[in-house]
Image (tube, rainbow, N blue to C red):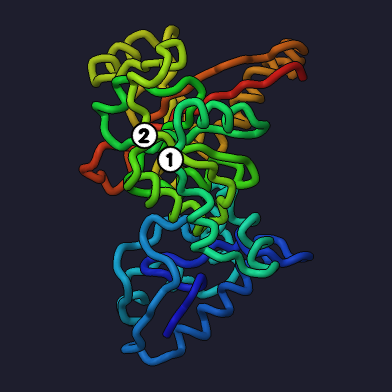
Amino acid sequence: MFTGDTLFLNEVGRPDLAVKSGLTSKDLAFLLYNSLEKIKKLPSHTKIYPGHGAGSSCGKNIGKGDFCTLETQEHSNYALKFHNPESFAEEILRGMPTPPQYFFNVVAKNKKEPFQFEEALAKANKALSVAEFKEELAQRNTHIIDIRGSNEEYNKGVIKGAYYIGHFGPFANYVGLLLDPTHNYLLIGDKDLAEDAIKRLIRIGYLNIKGYNKFPLSDWNQKDIIKYPHATLHDLKKAQQNENDYTILDVRNKSEYDTGVFEGKLTQIPIGELEQKVLEELIVDSGGKLVSQQQVFSSLCFRLSFQDSRHNPQPAPRIQIRYSHGPL
């Protein structure tokens, strides 16, 4: 049975992502419960082929694998163990991660005539000189995504204001969660990395990729480059001992956070909510009054490290988020 976005391995679909006017997430959770009840009546040897796998944003924590039997899911999938829709809905909607930005944009695109993938790839997959890159960057709502994947390359420096999302693991998930799909993007990375990244971004509706630059440091003016220090365990322990001087920020999703946290004082803000939370913290003081009406912040940079809950042995992707807002 092809279960689409209804039943995954060890997980079920997200009611908050369904686009249907007039129905709340709870209403849709009830409909999901009814669909699962029908599936549970099938023979236990029925093979389940879900529409998404581990790492997808379409479920809270989808298990690894391509298929399994219904009997296996009845034993391992928490969502199939409920016997009434109310308790099911409460659990399914609890700790739901922030919806990815691309999702509703893709839904709107899919309702229109389909785009031609090869045509979109040819338009985006262009090697740009530094001059051409800067010319594109000067256009409104144009941003840089640095896709280089190694610590060594990152430590040499990144372009000021770039989003650094290393090209490995859930690359497209992070882009889709954090970046506006209606904006324009330029990539930093070599030809092979760029082509694969562009394909992955086109598939989730990012059609405004303007090209890429291989980023040899010698081609760039050093005033355009910035380096960020790499925090060590020693630095983390130092932060623990000096809580008034440091803030430890945990940007994992709530489901990951619930599996265990770092000892000591920390602030937990899921990465998908970080930008809005930072805006609120910087603009509004503890009394709820505006701190400033002019140039609230400019070129505020964060470098965040991720480690997924499966302890992937690959280096955790870093995301540098730059906010540049003018007067309110």
Q: Is residue 195 above or below residue 265?
A: below
Reading the image, the residue beneath label 2 is 214
Name the residue located 33 percent from the left edge and 26 percent from the top edge. 216
Q: What is the quadrant of residue 93 in the picture? A: bottom right
Element carrying mark 2: loop
Residue lying furthest left in this view? Answer: 313
Residue 127 badge: 1
Residue shown at the point (57%, 59%) measured from the top left = 90
Residue 64 image offset from top left, x and y in percent: 30, 63
Task: Tell which residue pokes out farthest to the bottom in this image.
Answer: 43
Instruction: Give the camera-side residue of 192 and 153.
Output: 192
Residue drawn at 45 percent across, 10 percent down:
223
Within-10-Å neighbours for mark 1: few <14, some 14–19, many 20+: some
| Camera-side residue of 198 and 327 | 198
First in sequence: mark 1 or mark 2? 1
Q: Distance between the Cα atoms at labels 1 and 2?
A: 8 Å
* Quarter in which the N terminus is drawn: bottom left
Kindly check if marks 1 and 2 are in contact, taking CB atoms under 8 A apart as contact. Answer: yes
Tell me the residue at 41%/40% (across/down). 257
